[in-house]
Image (cartoon, rainbow, N blue to C red):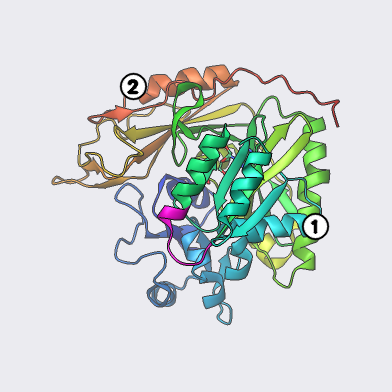
């Protein structure tokens, strides 16, 4: 059996990679996770996801011919370029294509060039703050300020007044040295959805639509985080909305990718806001979302491995994606104090492995303890607990009941994941 099992390297170290590893193993692969973490079987803690020579050696030693990339950093560092002329294939875009995520200004220009529905925006360099202040005043401060680069979740300011916009611009100027660019965008309103597909640059196979919960506290209050929970599918995203998103965002993106001088192979994530004027693209990510992946992957009935290989072979047209029925809800089990710069960690985690049927615990911010098999908290987002139910309310109930059974000191779980009131969406307005 193991003779037929393809050897695969998965790059990354979070709960998203735990979910990817489990799914790819179910699909028949032998998965080595570099570096992984103490909670993911098959982890290789000595090799970082951006140490390309070490990854290459590992691949040679273990007859690995396929690398699947979880996070953005190895893509932005050029992992797909590094392995280009080797017999090892990388599922993930090359460095230039990864700019769709790493540069907000470049990404907005791409959207404009290819007629993709998005918010109006103005781009500035760091010597043009006066112009940006004037434009923010003209829009009555209803703007979003975006730093043009990877800013670890701290580069976006959603403003409600001229004073807030002025404060955001001042903070941006103080935080960054030297030359940089930034965007000012009109502020849009509406619920957000995460749409993720696998593409070979010509076709795309979409996975289940999901919704993230980015703020720390209930009712979308408090500071922004990397995500406190997710669910899929999204009940209010009906066929009308999906067809319009296809027409105004996804199809023009594929035409755009074909027109650009780079190939895009990998996961492509569309962060979409459903506004009164129709769907608008807020951002691309060039990877699976986290924690969206933790609900989308168990929802996928089809083989992810087959989809990945088909995308690399340019054969996506031959594939279909089948989803499991019902709803999937993922709760982030976070360390108290997250997302502040510092908070206590190192607490023992109890209840791992006690999950009942229909529930899976994906481990992220963990490290080994003193005794064999013991895990300690080691970060903000410690784990994502995912439950499956016949419908969203049932899955939510099961997830919260199961989350009670996993314990560590200072554990925090946002209390309203998957329980936002159904939005009133005006679908006839556009
Ligand atoms: P981004 O990294 O560009 O997706 O921005 C992060 C978050 O800021 C998004 O998930 C939205 O919640 C919010 N945001 C970004 N752009 C806009 C916009 N034009 N209008 C309203 N909210 C926005
Ligand atoms: N959950 C949003 C992201 O992964 O960027």
Query: Viewed as shown, does residue 53 lie left or right of 230?
Result: left
The percent coordinates of residue 172 (x first, y second) are 47, 51
User: For the view shown, which residue lies furthest in the bottom direction?
Assistant: 85
Above or below, 352 relative to 124: above
Precedes in sequence: disc 2 or disc 1:
1
The percent coordinates of residue 277 (x first, y second) are 79, 33
Question: In which quadrant of the rendered view does residue 128 lie?
Answer: bottom right
Residue at the disc numbered 1: 114
Mark 2 beta carbon near ligand 2 (under 8 Å): no
Mark 1 beta carbon near ligand 1 (under 8 Å): no
- Tell me the residue at 27%/28% (across/down): 407
Residue at the disc numbered 2: 404
Q: What element carries label 1?
A: loop
Residue 178 is covered by the magenta coloring: yes
Residue 226 is covered by the magenta coloring: no
- Tell me the residue at 40%/49% (across/down): 14
Q: Magenta residues?
A: 173-180
């Amino acid at each position: 059996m193991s003779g037929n099992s393809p050897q695969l390297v998965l790059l990354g170290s979070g709960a998203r990679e735990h979910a990817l590893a489990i799914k790819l193993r179910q699909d028949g692969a032998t998965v080595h996770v570099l570096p992984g973490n103490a909670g993911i079987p098959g982890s290789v803690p000595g090799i970082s996801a951006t140490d390309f020579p070490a990854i290459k050696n590992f691949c040679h030693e273990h007859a690995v011919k396929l690398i699947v990339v979880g996070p953005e950093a190895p893509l932005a560092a050029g992992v797909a370029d590094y392995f280009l002329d080797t017999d090892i294939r990388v599922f993930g875009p090359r460095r230039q294509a990864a700019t769709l995520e790493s540069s907000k200004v470049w990404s907005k220009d791409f959207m404009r060039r290819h007629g993709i529905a998005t918010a109006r925006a103005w781009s500035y360099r760091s010597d043009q703050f006066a112009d940006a202040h004037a434009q923010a005043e003209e829009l009555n401060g209803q703007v979003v300020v975006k730093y043009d680069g990877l800013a670890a979740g701290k580069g976006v300011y959603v403003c409600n007044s001229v004073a807030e916009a002025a404060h955001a611009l001042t903070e941006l100027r103080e935080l960054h040295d030297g030359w940089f660019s930034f965007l000012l965008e009109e502020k849009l309103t509406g619920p957000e959805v995460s749409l993720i597909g696998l593409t070979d640059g010509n076709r795309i196979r979409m996975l289940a639509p999901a919704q993230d919960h980015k703020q720390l506290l209930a009712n979308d209050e408090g500071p922004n985080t990397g995500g406190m929970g997710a669910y899929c599918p999204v009940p209010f995203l009906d066929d009308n909305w999906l067809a319009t998103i296809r027409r105004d965002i996804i199809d023009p993106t594929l035409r755009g990718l074909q027109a650009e001088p780079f190939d895009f192979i990998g996961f492509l994530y569309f962060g979409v806001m459903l506004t009164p004027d129709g769907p608008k693209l807020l951002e691309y990510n060039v990877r699976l979302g986290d924690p969206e992946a933790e609900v989308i992957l168990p929802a996928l009935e089809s083989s992810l491995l087959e989809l990945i290989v088909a995308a690399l072979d340019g054969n996506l047209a031959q594939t279909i994606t089948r989803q499991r029925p019902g709803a999937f809800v993922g709760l982030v089990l976070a360390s108290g104090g997250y997302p502040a710069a510092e908070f206590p960690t190192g607490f023992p985690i109890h209840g791992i492995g006690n999950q009942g049927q229909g529930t899976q615990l994906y481990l992220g911010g963990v490290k080994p303890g003193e005794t064999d098999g013991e895990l300690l908290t080691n970060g903000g987002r410690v784990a994502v607990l995912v439950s499956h139910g016949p419908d969203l309310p049932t899955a939510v109930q099961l997830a919260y009941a199961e989350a009670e059974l996993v314990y560590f000191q200072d554990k925090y779980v946002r209390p309203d994941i998957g329980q936002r009131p159904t939005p009133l969406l005006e679908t006839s307005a556009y």
